[in-house]
Amino acid sequence: MFAVSKETADERVAVRTQALTKVFRGFRAVDSVNLEVREGTVHALVGPNGAGKTTLFNLLTGFLAPTSGTITVFEEDVTGRPPEQIARRGVARSFQITSLFDSMTSREHVELALQGPTRQGFRFWRSEKLLGRNQVRVDELLGQVGLTPLADKPVGLLAYGQKRALELSLALALDPPVMLLDEPTAGMGTEDVDRTIELVRRIAAGRTVVLVDHNMHVVGSLADRVTVLQQGKVLAEGDYDEVRNDERVITAYLGEADHA
Ligand SMILES: Nc1ncnc2c1ncn2[C@@H]1O[C@H](COP(=O)(O)OP(=O)(O)OP(=O)(O)O)[C@@H](O)[C@H]1O
Ligand SMILES: [Mg+2]
């Protein structure tokens, strides 16, 4: 058996930023960030509150236009492109919990999400065959996130962790090569956190994941590579152990604890 080294397998760069900068009325929320996310890896972005992580996500998905710098997706320049175009290049983010409809079931949410990328609109009834094919996929997606037993319950009746699982399945419905997850375990208890770690691990099989999370247990369990941001700038980068033992990183987090 040949051992394929991860280095070789992950040579392609999924997402690259060069000198990426976002200025809000004079405030540099993202400041000259050079990021290289290799294909097939889980790449974590960490850093104290206000470090610029979510802003960076908004830039990567086209929800914000950069002030300067460039973004490439699989080496194609997507700088300044609108969200739909970047999504079409394969970059998707997990849906926000606020975008769920309480009266609709999980199954209905996933059905809708599946119609999005195929541009079937609401006219799925036109094709029985397509509907049948979609149902298999719907069941698969609900099963992947452990929602099969709750599939036909109105979402308003689901627990917090279950709603977050549904969000992940909606993002998975797009089957994106690159998935951005912003704090998938925020507000969760230990049990839900561990379940989500397993879930993200499954999601990450065969795709690239960029993950923001404040929970270092989550980052340590999942991340192949970690970039630490502070005040919009890259403070450190490496694997989890390298970054965790970096003096500058320790100081940055201690500083945060002082102000908490
Ligand atoms: N639309 C905006 N207009 C002005 N300032 C903004 C805007 N969005 C973000 N900021 C500022 O940019 C900085 C970075 O915010 P961002 O939300 O990216 O941080 P974060 O690293 O995601 O923090 P957290 O860990 O708390 O989620 C903050 O100081 C924030 O107040
Ligand atoms: Mg944030």
Image (tube, grey):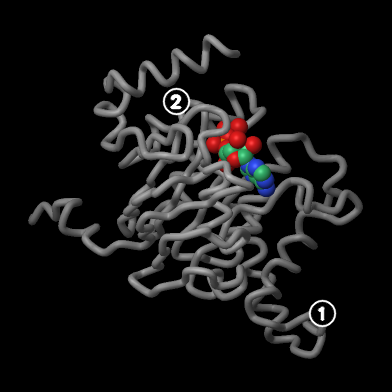
Residue at mark 1: 122
Q: Nearer the viewer, mark 1 or mark 2?
A: 2
Residue 190 percent location from the top left of the image: 58, 22
Q: Under tag 1, what secondary structure?
A: loop
Mark 1 Cα shell of 10 Å, populated few (<14), some (14-19), many (≥20): few
Query: Hey, which quadrant is residue 193 in on the image?
Result: top right
Mark 2 lies within 8 Å of ligand 1 (Cβ measured): no
Q: Distance from label 1 to label 2 (Cα)?
A: 42 Å
Instruction: From the viewer's perspective, tell me whether residue 237 is left or right of residue 126.
Output: left
Amino acid of disc 2: Met
- From this viewpoint, which residue is outermost toward the right? 103
Q: Under tag 2, what secondary structure?
A: helix
Residue at mark 2: 216
Residue 46 appears anywhere in the view: yes
Instruction: Determine the residue positioned at 42% across, 21% down.
Output: 252
Instruction: Determine the residue positioned at 76% across, 60% down.
Output: 109
For the N terminus, the image quarter is bottom left
Residue 78 percent location from the top left of the image: 46, 71
Residue 82 percent location from the top left of the image: 60, 71
Residue 143 drawn above or below residue 110:
above
Q: Nearer the viewer, residue 15 or 110?
A: 15
Instruction: Determine the residue positioned at 47% across, 52% down.
Output: 21
- From this viewpoint, which residue is outermost toward the top? 258
**Is tag 1's residue or tag 2's residue first in the polypeptide sequence?**
1
Residue 79 drawn above or below residue 121:
above
- From this viewpoint, which residue is outermost toward the bottom? 126
Counting every numbered tag in the picture gives: 2
Q: Nearer the viewer, residue 171 or 140?
A: 171
Q: Nearer the viewer, residue 76 or 219?
A: 76
Residue 196 appears anywhere in the view: no
Amino acid of disc 1: Phe
Residue 124 percent location from the top left of the image: 78, 82
